[in-house]
């Protein structure tokens, strides 16, 4: 069996980046690996997503091209090898929101305004038809992971309380989390957003880690970025961005805020379950 490094070398050699040097980049919570390529003063990113470990580059490619078609800054696809799981991507740099804000605190609000505006722009367009729905039934299953993997790891299994939770939360989701769906990236937060100040409008926000996109409630990604599990967003900024989104999209204020609150509970229960596994 040919090892991944040899396959990667062959893939790069088949592109305009033949002869580039490679340096590892920090990965994410997956089996994907990333290298930065350097050639003649330019850079690109190599994604290594082995199929035998459950990775599939096709969703990333499909969503990247959709986002780019709307004028948003997903990495451009420069070359692909679906069979072996390699992508050559535009390098959007290292200016993650999570790194820029500590260095330049005065940019915190402008960055969150840009992230909110990128969602406003995205939500003007209907999602691709083939995206799976992140509807109340799916959200309920995801929230219930907190019982199975978080509480279940600390307490004896309690199916009675899980059933009671499911019944109660299903009613809440049906009442407040149903809406005309949009594309939701599901990991829209400061560790996955890049600041691209030389670009214009919503393109100033570089997008990463969107391959698990689904179609769901317009508030979902706003909750993701403003109720970030990895950093505390100041309450004044959170409130201002909710108001900004509602004003720009014409959402009903009361209904949207109720959905935002419910989706915040749902998302945090899912996170508890996943990381308690």
Image: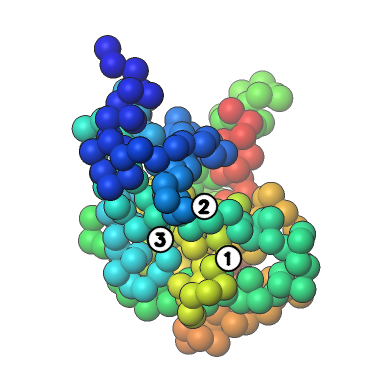
Q: Nearer the viewer, residue 247 or 49?
A: 49
Q: Can you give x and y, in whole percent of width and height, for residue 271 in the image?
A: 60, 43
Mark 2 Cα-neighbour bin, 10 Å: few <14, some 14–19, many ≥20:
many
- As measured in the structure, the alpha-carbon distance from the residue carrying label 3 to the one carrying label 2 is 14 Å
Q: Can you give x and y, in whole percent of width and height, for residue 252 in the image?
A: 51, 83
Mark 3 Cα-neighbour bin, 10 Å: few <14, some 14–19, many ≥20:
many
Occupied quadrant, residue 125: bottom left
Which quadrant would the C terminus be assigned to in this image? top right
Mark 1 Cα-neighbour bin, 10 Å: few <14, some 14–19, many ≥20:
many
Residue hosting label 2: 187
User: Number of marks in the image?
Assistant: 3
Q: Earlier in the sequence, mark 3 or mark 2?
A: 3
Element class at badge 3: loop
What residue is shown at x 62% (from left), y 82% (from top)? 243
- As measured in the structure, the alpha-carbon distance from the residue carrying label 1 to the one carrying label 3 is 12 Å
What residue is shown at x 39% (from left), y 40% (from top)? 20
Q: Nearer the viewer, residue 233 or 83?
A: 83
What residue is shown at x 52% (from left), y 35% (from top)? 24
Q: Can you give x and y, in whole percent of width and height, for residue 78 in the image?
A: 29, 52
Q: Which color mode does the image show?
A: rainbow
Q: Nearer the viewer, residue 143 or 70?
A: 70
Residue hosting label 3: 74
Q: Earlier in the sequence, mark 2 or mark 1?
A: 2
Element class at badge 2: loop
Q: Nearer the viewer, mark 2 or mark 1?
A: 1
Relative to 37, 105 lies left or right: right
Residue hosting label 1: 195
- Asked whether disc 3 touches disc 2, contact meaning CB atoms under 8 Å apart, the reply is no
Q: Extreme front residue here?
A: 40
């Amino acid at each position: 069996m040919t090892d991944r490094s040899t396959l990667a070398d062959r893939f790069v050699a088949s592109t305009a980046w033949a002869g580039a040097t490679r340096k590892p980049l920090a990965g994410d919570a997956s089996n994907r690996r990333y290298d930065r390529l350097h050639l003649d003063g330019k850079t690109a990113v190599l994604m290594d997503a082995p199929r035998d470990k459950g990775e599939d580059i096709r969703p990333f490619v499909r969503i990247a091209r959709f986002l780019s078609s709307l004028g948003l800054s997903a990495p451009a696809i420069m070359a692909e090898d679906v069979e072996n799981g390699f992508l050559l991507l535009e390098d959007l740099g290292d200016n993650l929101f999570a790194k820029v804000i500590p260095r330049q605190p005065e940019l915190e609000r402008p960055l969150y305004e840009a992230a909110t505006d990128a969602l406003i722009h995205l939500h003007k367009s209907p999602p691709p038809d083939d995206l799976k729905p992140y509807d109340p039934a799916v959200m309920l299953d995801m929230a219930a992971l907190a019982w199975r993997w978080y509480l279940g790891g600390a307490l004896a299994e309690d199916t009675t309380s899980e059933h009671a939770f499911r019944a109660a939360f299903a009613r809440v989701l049906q009442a407040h989390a149903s809406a005309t769906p949009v594309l939701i990236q599901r990991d829209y937060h400061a560790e996955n957003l890049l600041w691209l100040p030389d670009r214009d409008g919503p393109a100033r926000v570089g997008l990463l880690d969107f391959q698990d996109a689904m179609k769901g409630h317009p508030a979902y990604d706003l909750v993701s970025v403003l109720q970030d599990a990895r950093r505390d967003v100041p309450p004044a900024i959170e409130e201002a961005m909710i108001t900004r989104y509602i004003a720009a999209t014409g959402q009903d204020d009361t209904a949207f805020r109720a959905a935002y609150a419910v989706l915040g509970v749902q998302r945090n229960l899912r996170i508890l379950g996943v990381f308690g596994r």
